[in-house]
Image (tube, rainbow, N blue to C red):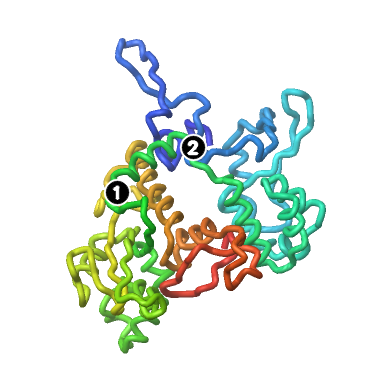
């Protein structure tokens, strides 16, 4: 939406970097700061939209495109069906253009209704060209155009997307994430693992059945009187194989582990209360692994990006944005990731860790793609298709 109709201060739910403002005069001699005209808003505040993706096409200049209220009203009428709402108008050059309206809500509805058609039968010339447009080689494009399995198609498209680097931070986000990551204690120049523990509002509905089932497996049958309303951190640590030491012929395997969580204080206490703690952030697990844990330097001041906390100013949102994106970067780059697919982040990370399988020495070398070591702590171990 235009700035004057934005529900968020500064024009984006992702907050305001200092780059967003320019100084202007308010007539009183005092400096006045306002958002620069044309500075990216919405998701574009976070992600750089490359010009080549839309072939450099300009946004239509039809007068109808300036009526945001009417466009929103048309979009909200969409409740499903084969055709998304659209507007046909004439731009400044006198050309008739058709603009298809969309947004997060409508796109999800449309995708869920039509996902099967997207992968039912690829049209070879178009599929091949799509892959080439994304930066694939001729061989990769040919391979993609011949795929039939929906899972293979989605994973191959995802791997091509990751290879192309299409998802890139805006320069100011990349700069500030890089600066913030330097404040972390974990030695990122060494191999490290990550664990994502999502609790918070997920515990109220989406994760409730999984929590109940876990405690039932531990002998607790009273759903209203469980030891905790979450699945303990120890369950995540079970994804480390105790036989790994035997396989490698060593007594101990040491791992640095970064924990990204919206419940850091409780998770820290779980680590400190572990049965074989060495210190407040080091434990010996399963008779094989010596795990050293690291947390976000903000610790208990961390919020998920869509939560306001005590301060919902434009700058506070941007600060949380940088914290969240720094965590995302660290999670994506880790050697081993442990999480679950009930979380949006867990599913996103599975997507971002899917790559082309160029290493034919792997046991699964027949697979066209592979997911960098990703282990599911609890819940379904098969990821949903994108958008679900």
What is the residue that sits farthest to the left in this orientation?
279
- Per the image, the residue denoted by label 2 is 170
Tell me if residue 211 can be seen: no
What residue do we see at 61% from left, 63% from top? 369
> Which residue: 59% across, 57% down?
108
- Answer above or below: position of 175 versus 274: above
Q: Nearer the viewer, mark 1 or mark 2?
A: 1
Q: Quadrant of the rendered structure where residue 55 is?
A: top right
Along the viewing direction, whichever of 57 and 361 lies nearer the viewer? 361
Front position in the image: 48 or 244: 244
**228 shown above or below 108:** below
Using the image, tell me which numbered label, if any, was put on residue 184: 1
Q: Classify residue 109 by image quadrant.
A: bottom right
Q: Is residue 73 left or right of residue 129?
A: left
What is the x, y in percent for residue 313?
33, 38
| Residue found 32% across the figure and 86% down from its top | 218
- Quick check: can you spot residue 273? yes
Say which mark, if any, is on residue 247: none
Residue 284 locus on image (x, y percent):
25, 73
- Position of residue 228 measured from the top left corner of the image (x, y, whole percent): 27, 75
Q: Is 304 positioned to the left or the right of 370 in the image?
A: left
For the image, the number of numbered tags is: 2
Instruction: Name the N-terminal-most of marks 1 and 2.
Output: 2
Q: Secondary structure at mark 1?
A: loop
* C-alpha span from label 1 to label 2: 22 Å
Q: Position of residue 290 (x, y in %)?
A: 28, 70
Which corner quadrant of the image does residue 113 belong to? Answer: bottom right
Q: Quadrant of the C terminus?
A: bottom right
Q: Which residue appears at 35% of the width and 58% of the height? A: 260
Of all residues shown, which one is farthest toward the front?
249
User: Badge 1 local density, few (<14 within 10 Å), some, or many (20+)?
Assistant: some
Q: Is residue 25 above or below residue 342?
A: above
């Amino acid at each position: 939406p235009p700035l004057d109709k934005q529900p968020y201060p500064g024009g984006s739910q992702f907050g305001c970097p200092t780059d967003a403002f320019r100084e202007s005069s308010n007539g009183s001699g005092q400096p006045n700061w306002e958002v620069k005209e044309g500075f990216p808003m919405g998701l574009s505040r976070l992600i750089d939209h490359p010009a080549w993706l839309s072939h450099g096409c300009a946004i239509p200049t039809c007068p109808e495109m300036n009526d945001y209220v009417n466009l929103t009203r048309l979009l909200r009428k969409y409740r499903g069906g084969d055709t998304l709402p659209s507007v046909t108008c004439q731009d400044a050059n006198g050309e008739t253009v058709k603009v298809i309206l969309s947004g997060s809500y409508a796109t999800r509805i449309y995708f869920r209704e039509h996902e099967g058609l997207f992968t039912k039968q690829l049209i070879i010339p178009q599929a091949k060209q799509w892959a080439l447009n994304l930066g694939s080689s001729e061989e990769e494009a040919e391979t993609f155009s011949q795929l039939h399995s929906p899972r293979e198609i989605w994973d191959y498209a995802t791997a091509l997307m990751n290879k192309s680097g299409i998802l890139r931070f805006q320069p100011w986000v990349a700069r500030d994430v890089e600066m913030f990551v330097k404040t972390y204690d974990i030695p990122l120049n060494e191999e490290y693992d990550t664990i994502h523990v999502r609790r918070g509002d997920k515990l109220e509905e989406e994760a409730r059945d999984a929590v109940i089932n876990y405690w039932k497996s531990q002998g607790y049958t009273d759903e209203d009187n469980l030891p905790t309303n979450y699945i303990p951190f120890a369950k995540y640590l079970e994804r480390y194989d105790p036989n790994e030491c035997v396989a490698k012929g060593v007594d101990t395997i040491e791992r640095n582990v970064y924990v990204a969580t919206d419940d850091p204080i409780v998770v820290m206490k779980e680590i400190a209360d572990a049965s074989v703690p060495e210190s407040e952030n080091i434990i010996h697990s399963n008779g094989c692994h010596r795990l050293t844990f690291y947390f976000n330097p903000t610790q208990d001041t961390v919020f998920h990006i869509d939560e306001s906390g005590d301060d919902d100013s434009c700058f506070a949102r941007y600060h949380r944005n940088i914290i969240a994106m720094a965590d995302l970067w660290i999670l994506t780059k880790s050697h081993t990731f442990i999480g679950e697919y009930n979380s949006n982040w867990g599913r996103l990370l599975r997507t971002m860790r899917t790559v082309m399988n160029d290493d034919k020495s792997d046991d699964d070398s027949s697979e066209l793609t592979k997911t960098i070591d990703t282990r599911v702590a609890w819940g379904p171990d098969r990821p949903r298709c994108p958008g679900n």
